[in-house]
Every structure is written in structure tokens, then in C-alpha cells.
Image (cartoon, rainbow, N blue to C red):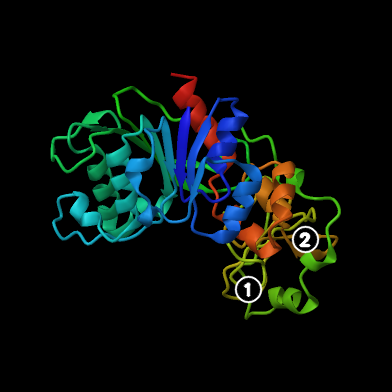
Amino acid sequence: MKIGTDFSGIGSPESALKRLGLDIEEVFACEIDKYARKSFTELHNPNTFYEDITTRNHSEVPQLDLYVAGFPCQSFSMAGKRGGFEDTRGTLFFNVAEFIKENKPKCFVLENVKGLLSHDKGRTYQTITDVLTNGGGTLNGQISVDSLDSGLGYHVYTKVLNTKDYGVPQNRERIFIVGFKDFRDFNFPKKMDLKLRLKDLLESDVDEKYYLSDKLIEGFKKGSWGNRYKLKEGNSIANCLDTKEGNRRTNNYISHSLYPRSSTSGKGGSGHLSKSDGTSYCVDTGCSQGVEYKKKIRRLTPLECWRLQGFTDSQFYKAEKVNSDTQLYKQAGNSITVNVLVELFNKIYYER
């Protein structure tokens, strides 16, 4: 199976396909961040590794069986307001659509933040689905009344999926857009019972450098840091990890102690402390979460953040050899959760 990925990061799609045991040929990957490329190269072996989707000659890529892209959310000009290609020029989605138009992959999976649905009052999402489906395609099984030739004519299904529903204790909502060149019925994977809690993914022996200083901890007790720093109950779902490293008052923190109830202090602020036997906050690119252990608060380690995105320890150790903690945090936060893709690809290729 020939696959290619744009905005490849550290290779979540490739990891998911390999976990399913599918025989894949990594035709290409494309990632502009030089540090992420280092990690990707340690984990995967694409035939060609592009740095920039905007400069690639799409015609040189053989037709793919699967194309995956987690493109950024950007506003469109809406100059024509018809949902065609002209409306998307100057954005990275335009380059994604151009590639799909040229390559005509049998299937594509696009991923974005949940906010894409409401971005620019819903016009961004509307334009994207118009471009993908117009010209004879369908959206969620419904035939489009608009048959503009400017569209790609794919049969598209969209849904918001949450990492916590697919085996990983992290509250991470992302919209997935699945398109097929030929029409077929498709149902997104059903939710699964969550058996793991954050405590199951924590390291037992953590370097002191990950613990917060007394000065930062005092900030939790003062009004300037706010009463929204909370110790969440054990069965709660942790928020999405972000891209920071736990050194700002807007960061998220998780408690490792078994406190009898939630506790708060101060006024204002926006950070959170959650118990380690709950689930993680959403992973972002700095992994600005902490856990409290024996009355001490620490941020999550890079390894814990990679675990919260479904990567194996062996994958992390390979990437750790070529990257700093800062980049490893960022790479985890920018990734698509591997477990979610495993279930999604399973529905596409096995459970038809």
C-alpha cells in the first residue's frame, strides 16, 4: 500500500499502519521542522522526504493508496464565496487540495483542531468540504446539490474524535475528514471503554529537573496565579497537553497525590492540577502539564507526553537520541494520537 503524508511530524500515520500490520510503502513524508525530521528519520524510512509542501512537484509522486495531512487551520479570502479553489489560495489547505487534485489518492485522511468547525463563523469548514466534495462527491453520505467543477468530487465523511475514547487517557478532540475517490459507506470507529488512567503512564523514577521550584509552587497559593489551578478527581479526564514546558501560569498541571477532594486557591489564572489516576490534559507542543508527587509538583516528562500520544517507549528513545526535551515536548503536542489513527485505519481497511 502506497502512502504519503504532509505535515508529517514524527509519523503518527506510519506508526498506526505498522501497528495494524499493513504492508506499506512510505512513498514520501513532508515536514518543514528540522527537529521533527530528525525524529521522523529515526522512526521511519520514506522513499523521499520533502521539507515544504508549497515547493513540491506533485506530478512526480505516484498515485497513493492513502494520503494523510494534519494541515493548519487558516482563514480563507472568501473572495468568490463559492467554496472553490480560488477561495483557499494563500493557505496550506490550498496546497493539500492541489496535491489531491493532481495525485487522486484512493483515500485521504485530513486532521485538524475541533475549532475548525466554528472557525471564521463556520465558513472555513464549509469551504474545505465544498472543495473536497463539489464536482460529484458526497458529504457524510449526502449528495451535494452544488456540482461545481472546481471541486475534487470525493466522497467525504467528517467527525470529531476524542483521544480518551480510543484507549489513551487524554482529552484531545480533533476533527477527522476522510475522503474516498470511489463512493463507499463509511462509519467512524465506535468509542471504547477507557481502561488506562494517567497514573498508568507515569514514570516511577523522574529526574529532579522536572519538578517545579518552590517559587512556582508558591504561585499556586497566591491570588496572582488563580483559583483555576485545580486538583481534579481521580476519574476525571485530563485536558489536552499543549506545547509549553510547565513554566508559565497558563500551563496545565496534574496532581500525582491521592487527594480526598478537588482543591483550589487564589484568583484568576488558567492552569490545572489533575490527579495522576485520572486522565491527562490534552498534549500540546510544550507538554505544559505537571503531576504532584509526595506534595511536590512536577511537569510531565517528554516520555510521558509521547506515551499520551500513543507512541511506544522504544520509539521515544530513538527520538531522544537526536532531540532535546524542548523539541520532544513540541513533537508530542503536534502529533495525531496514534491510537485514534489505528482505530480509524482499522475501519477503513479491515471493518468495511
Place of residue 235 in the rendered image (x, y in percent of width and height, measured from the top left): 67, 45
Place of residue 99 in the rendered image (x, y in percent of width and height, measured from the top left): 33, 44
The one of 261 and 211 positioned closer to us in this rendering: 211
User: Any mark on residue 25, and which?
Assistant: none
Which residue, given by chain and number where applicable, does mark 2 sit on? 292
Query: Callout 2, which amino acid?
Result: Glu
**For residue 202, above or below residue 245:** above
- Crowd class of label 2 (few under 14; some 14 to 19; many from 20; radius 10 Å): many
- Horizontally, residue 232 falls left or right of residue 186, namely right
Q: Quadrant of residue 220?
A: bottom right
Place of residue 161 in the rendered image (x, y in percent of width and height, measured from the top left): 47, 40
Query: Which residue, as the protein is rendered here, is positioned at the far front?
Result: 60
Among the two numbered marks 2 and 1 on one chain, the one whose residue lies closer to the N terminus: 1
Which residue, given by chain and number where applicable, does mark 1 sit on? 248
**For residue 108, above or below residue 20:** below
Q: Label 2, label 1: how many angstroms apart (C-alpha)?
A: 16 Å
